[in-house]
Amino acid sequence: MINKNLRWNKHVPFLLKPAAKDYLWGGSRLNDDFSKGIAMEPLAETWECSTHPDGLSLAADGCFAGRTLAEILKEHPEYLGTHPDAENGFPILIKLIDAKKDLSVQVHPDDAYAMEHEHGQHGKTEMWYVLDAAPGAELVYGLQYDVDRSLMRKSIEEGTVERFLQKVPIKKDDVFYIEAGKIHAILAGALVAEIQENSNLTYRLYDYNRTDKNGKKRELHIDKALAVADLKGSSRPRQPLRVLKYRRGCAMELLCRCRYFEVYRMLINTERCRELVDYRADSTSFHVLLCIGGCGCLLWDGGEIRFFKGDCIFVPADSVEVKLHGRAQLLDVKG
């Protein structure tokens, strides 16, 4: 993972180093499967691309090495392009999540509620791409039927809230869009890439009466959760229609498009075509490339980045023209 002879007077891509979280439900797959080399156990999440103060990612190489992405973007706001939220800072956060155990049943506020009640913070709408799932793995997606707030509150107090939850089986390559207000939970056995608004606002409804390493139960946020939660029954989520578009050495498909981000899956294979793949990022917005399989190189006139499974690359708006080479699967996230 090296850069050569970088021309830092231009908008060139750079590797990121993640922040890490040791939440009690995490496992070891982010080290085992992605070679993160992070001395943390359990290792629940890596915040691959983040300017959030709760977990800042760093530039891993080049003249920015060791500096936070937040610092770099403050110094170079032009790297964000003309994203409508650019004036409010970096708009997204990208994570890898290893759920060895169930995550709490939770809900996130929307922007309006967060602005009013959480000191002007962003709300949290998110998307999950399932990287792997154990046999029988599930997630919580909304409620099975309508529930009023008083009954929901009572069921939380009595520890019976799980009877209302809609559980959905998952498999590798599934996509789920989780709007703010949707009650949800990633459950044991899921390995997930999460793309979300730049927020760390999570209201826990229920945490299975678990205790942390100090023997304390984690805080619940019942009043706030019930203020923002959609308590109507949810239809079972359907996988979006996905169409692979091919060109020589590359195939791409749209996974999710919303007001906050666009996410594509990109398959690169230049082993036989003997041609490099042109990667022309949008000149009006930054992109983030997250390698979720294989390895390859990102090359431009005067520099290169060698990337491997688990690596994350920030591509500034109006980037130099770059090419891709290798055999890899990437998530291409546009702000």
Image (cartoon, grey):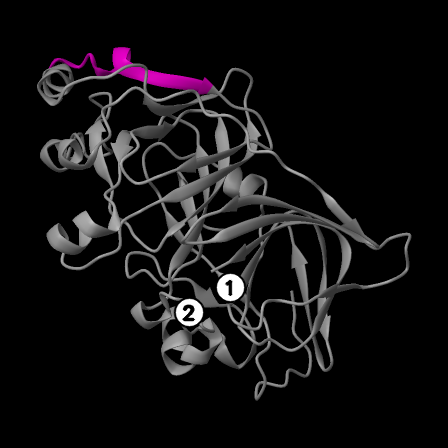
Residue 311: in sight, yes or no? Answer: yes
Q: Which mark is residue 187?
A: none
The amino acid sitting under disc 1 is Leu
User: Closer to the N terminus: mark 1 or mark 2?
Assistant: 1
* Residue sitting nearer the eye, 243 or 46: 243
Magenta stretch bounds: 158-168
Image quarter of residue 106: top left
Please provide percent x and percent y for residue 280. Answer: 67, 67
Please provide percent x and percent y for residue 77. Answer: 41, 78
Please provide percent x and percent y for residue 124. Answer: 31, 47
Q: Is residue 323 left or right of residue 187?
A: right
Q: Quadrant of the N terminus?
A: bottom right
Tag 2 residue: 69
* Residue sitting nearer the eye, 56 or 243: 243
Q: Is residue 211 above or below residue 120?
A: above
The amino acid sitting under disc 2 is Leu
Please provide percent x and percent y for residue 222. Answer: 13, 31
Residue at figure coordinates x 52%, y 44% from the top left: 256
Q: Is residue 249 above or below residue 7?
A: above
Q: CA distance from mark 1 to mark 2?
A: 8 Å
Q: Is residue 294 left or right of residue 191?
A: right
Q: Secondary structure at mark 1?
A: strand
Tag 1 residue: 16
Q: Is residue 282 left or right of residue 181?
A: right
Q: Residues within 10 Å of mark 1 (few under 14, many from 20)?
A: many
User: Do residues under tags 1 and 2 come within 8 Å of each other at their CB atoms?
Assistant: yes
